[in-house]
Amino acid sequence: MIEVREIGKSFGERVALRDVSFSLKAGEALAVIGPNGAGKTTLLSILADVREPDSGSVDLGGGRVGFVPQQAAIYRRLTVEENLRLFARLERVDDVDASVEAMLEQTGLGERRGDQTGTLSGGNQQRVNIAIGLLSRPALLLLDEPSTGLDPRQRSRLWEFVLSLAAGGTSVIFTTHNVSEAERYGDRLLVLADGEDLFDGTAAELHAAVPGSEGTDFESAFVTFLRERGH
Amino acid sequence: MNWAPIRWLLVKDLQLLRRSPLLTALLVIYPIAIAVLIGFALSGGPDKPRVAFLNQVPTEDSFELGGEDFDVVGARGELCSRIECVRVETREQAIDLVESGEVLGALILPADLVEKLRSLGGLTPAQPVVEVLVNEEDPVKAQLVDDRIDALLAEANLRISQTISEISTQYLNILLNGGSFGFLSEDFEILGLRTAAEILSEISAGLAASDPNRAQLAEVVDFAGLAIENLDIADDLLASVSQPIQVDKQVISGNAPGLDAFAIAVAATITLMFVTVLLVAGSLALEREENAYARLTRGLISKGALLGEKVLLGVLVSLVVTLLMLFGLELFVSLDWGRFPIWIPAIVAGGAAFAAFGAAIGVTAREVRASSLLAFMVSLPIAFLSLVPSGTVGAGLYKAIEVFAAAFPFDPALRALGGALDSAGPSVWAALGHLVALTVVYGLLARVALRRFG
């Protein structure tokens, strides 16, 4: 069980997060959505221990946390295998060789293992990026806009992969600008706007929270939801 | 401290270096190029300036001054060993060469040079004049020619004035003590003041005490005595006129390191600085450019350990590159290999301070190119200022430069390497202490700046 209680974060005068709270069960996928500047990436960076919150508490349940930043955090002059091997060693993975082989198989990059990652397509770079986040077999996987820059086929493969992880018991928190993706792949949605959490529930619950939105698509309902709350 | 992450990141950085052929080539070629340039400069010596030389003096003409033969042909040979003489036949040719820039200047010896030189030993001296033509388009070259020709002429003038002084002394001695004197192919016997005074004294002694001529003779004898006394010291006066100031150089304390050792230390320090600062600043900026910094510092490696790894990378690479440069220099100049054990701490301490400085620069830039440009722009003026010698600027400004230079690693690294390469150089240990302090200070600055690096 993951518990986040009233965390706040400011950058100078600007408030990035204001008393955000939520919880997450094992194997659950939480989609964090909201307009630009809502605080989505700040929230993930706090959960990933990249940033310290100014207030509040975070309990990640003691398990390992895998972090996949929005832009591929890989060394472009190293090969796919060298990147995986380096981060497996830094993650102090027990069996480096086995972990690297497993990730190469899971991401379908076995044939490109000797290629420098800078020569891969954006989609394949993102797969390496995600594979690095999974090397330590985390109990919680944090994905910051993972489908950005991927074509529809790559996006589909990515979500198939993520859902299989969740089915295996890995909790997943992902941010996205694509509301349809959030509706489709998130068990629950956390809506942030200007650092405040406006909604925490399923897509159906959000739809229902917007009077007169029956018959409209989820994206329209979401935009109306934000407008009604002054965003 | 957990060294495993540092080790793996170091391996990764060396792999990245190996994958960057241009950067690796530069790291190898740069020190070799510096070594070759410095080596040629130290072993080749300065080039002689090309000067057009018009000698209008008849070749058989030579002259004797004060019994010493002045060989014009020999003097010309000596002159042309100091400058590269381009023989010309006419004054117009000399002017053309100077105007076209083929030569830096022209030296014209007039036909009456020997005749006038010869007159200096006679009673009707005439001052000889040589003509120097200079192209002032390039002030540096013009100054070089001026200085070289001025030095040569000053040397010739000194030699001639010493000879004239000796001739004058001979004339004075004849006047004082008597002797033979040649003029217009005839020899004249000169009585001399001493003998004249003795003769007058004897005549005066033979006169009666009441003789009125006796008092007048006594006045003449007194004058002769006074003249003898004063002319006696004229020898020394004439000698001092020919060379008014003599230099008596005494070394009071310490020995300056040899010019070669200093040049090598400067070359090694510049190599150390550029390689280390650019590498560390670029390597740290690369972590951000590749978006890896956030991933690394969320528990995989501490920020302090990440900085330590970059400093270690800088020290390792700079040690290899600097030693490579010194090995290359050995082909041209002889290095004191007995001091090798002192080279290592000097290079390591210099490398560490430059690496910490590079890290402080690297954390301020978001991308490798920006960090490299910043590192270059900051390092170069610091190196220039650190090389300003005392006495070339005002005392206040020099003090300010000293304080400024002490805040950066170049000056102590130069002192450490200078002392390590040459036993006559500055204290190595004081410089090492300075470098260690700078490593700590810049390391702390970089660590503080890392807070906003993500």
Image (cartoon, coloured by chain):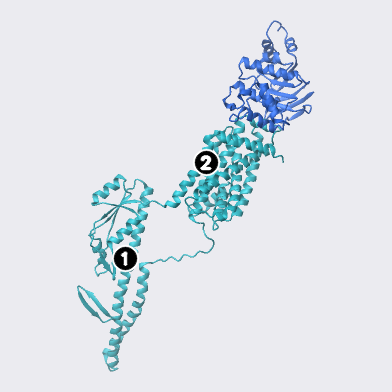
Chain colours: A blue, B cyan
Disc 1 marks a residue whose amino acid type is Ile
Asked whether, in this view, residue B79 is left or right of residue A30, the answer is left
How far across and down, in percent of the image, does residue A28 sit?
76, 19
Which secondary structure lies at badge 1? helix
Q: Quadrant of residue A214?
A: top right
Q: Is residue A57 above or below residue B440?
A: above
Q: Are marks 1 and 2 on the same chain?
A: yes
Tell me the quadrant of the picture where the C terminus of chain A can be found.
top right
Name the residue furthest left: B185
Q: Residue at x 63, y 17 (%)?
A: A154
Q: Is residue A39 at all visible to an observer of this figure? A: no
Residue B160 image label: 1
Asked whether, in this view, residue A220 is left or right of residue B19, the answer is right
Tell me the quadrant of the picture where the N terminus of chain A can be found.
top right
Q: Is residue A113 at all visible to an observer of this figure? A: yes
Please state which of residues A123 and A107 is positioned toward the viewer in this rendering: A107
